[in-house]
Image (tube, helix red, strand yellow):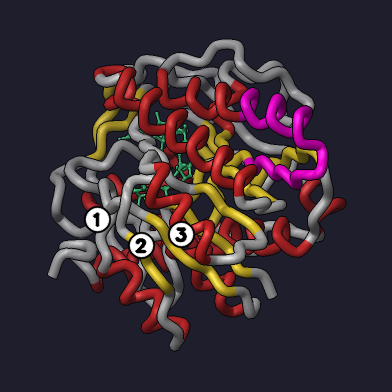
Amino acid sequence: MAKVLVTGGAGYIGTHTLVELLAAGHEPIVIDNLVNSSAESLKRVAKISGQEVAFYKFDLCDSEKLNDLCGAENFDAVIHFAGLKAVGESVAKPLEYYQNNLQSTLTLLAAMEKHHIPSLIFSSSATVYGDPSELPLKETSRVGVGLTNPYGKTKYFIEEILRDWSAAHPDKQVTILRYFNPIGAHPSGLIGEDPQGPPNNLMPYVAQVAAGVRPELTINGNDYDTPDGTGVRDYIHVVDLARGHVAALSNPATGVRTYNLGTGKGVSVMEAVAAFEKACGHPIAYKIGPRRAGDIATCYASADLAAAELGWRATKTLDEACQDAWRWQSQNPQGFRQ
Ligand code: NAD
Ligand code: WQD
């Protein structure tokens, strides 16, 4: 049983991870400034789990509040989800992204040093692979080349910072998890992804078209060098992803470890839309648009390292993810706003 500080715990991946942490007997404590989430999500976690989660609403860049909390609690580990994540917004507001994502991480690492917290799990992204040098992407594949937006660069820079930090503090346990494309929702339909404004990512957009919130999906190009011409990605059910964090927490090792969390399977936009149509029971309106700036054709993981070292593999299917996303979308048309 570990007492775990969960930064950004009110968000999409954070809430699903809280459910899995509680189910595994851990004690999570959340910090979130709710810049991209709401406290209702944590009430839903309590409803699913039958347990309340302690929650502190403040900005992770607030060193005084963070040190007060870390001084009062004896944390065994930190799972660091907090960050801004909208790719397009990061191009328009680079300083906001660098300030928030980098400064919050630096503040957190300083507090971990001061309060002797031994273990960190960091939310990185397949985006650090940039333009893939090989497929499937392995943890040893080239990173940092062809990063087209400040958001992705914050993930790459933070990985570098963590390597330097670990070199100076070899007793710390640092786990970098590179998520591929998280989708789906908890099967209860009580928590899920709740985009503010038009969704940036494919699946929440498809869900809103399916629900009639938006008229049609624009497919960002069908002239890629892929089997059907549309972009191919590795979509992973968010509950599988959440369980990957519990597996990392249960398998500590000193130094820096890096794992892909993906399924190992590539799925095209057309295949993803077809799976969602099956889940919701009706066609999804779409049109073919131009390519999206900065997009790559194909990206999927080798998921073998996490299987070998953490004993973790994704088990849920694309169909299950679409069914769960549709349940969440149809039961919560306003997301967490009631
Ligand atoms: P999310 O926006 O739902 O959750 C992030 C949470 O962090 C939000 O609740 C937000 O309010 C909080 N937050 C942001 N800045 C903060 C700050 N300075 N202080 C306190 N709280 C702050 O996003 P998510 O999809 O749950 O992503 C979680 C993490 O995983 C992020 O770091 C994200 O970059 C990373 N990630 C996400 C994806 C994805 O597609 N969802 C893919 C790869 C990596
Ligand atoms: C998937 C596919 C699009 C929307 C992004 C971030 C990445 C990571 C995950 C955080 C692509 C196509 C999309 C639409 C479409 N996030 N698409 N119409 O781009 O693989 O990754 O989210 O770390 O950093 O870049 O995911 O869901 O945006 O796109 O045709 O309206 O769907 O072109 O082929 P992506 P996505």
In this picture, residue 255 sits left or right of residue 189: right
Q: Nearer the viewer, residue 137 or 221?
A: 137
Residue at image position (68%, 37%) is 301
Residue at image position (30%, 58%) is 57
When the figure is inspected, residue 158 is found, relative to residue 26, above or below; the finding is above
When the figure is inspected, residue 92 is found, relative to residue 236, above or below; the finding is above
Q: Mark 1 falls on what kind of element? A: helix
Residue 69 visible:
yes
CB-based contact (under 8 Å), mark 3 and mark 2: yes
Q: Mark 2 falls on what kind of element? A: strand
Tag 1: residue type?
Ala
Q: Which of marks 1 and 3 is nearer the N terminus?
A: 3
Q: Position of residue 83 (x, y in %)?
A: 41, 40
Local packing at callout 1 (Cα closer than 10 Å; few below 14, some 14-19, many 20+) is many
Residue 124 shown in magenta: no
Q: Nearer the viewer, residue 147 or 102?
A: 102
Residue pointed to by mark 3: 69
Residue pointed to by mark 2: 56
Local packing at callout 2 (Cα closer than 10 Å; few below 14, some 14-19, many 20+) is some
Where are the magenta residues, as a range? 159-177
Residue sitting at the far right? 308
Residue 173 shown in magenta: yes
Distance from disc 3 to disc 2, alpha carbons, whole Å, reads 9 Å
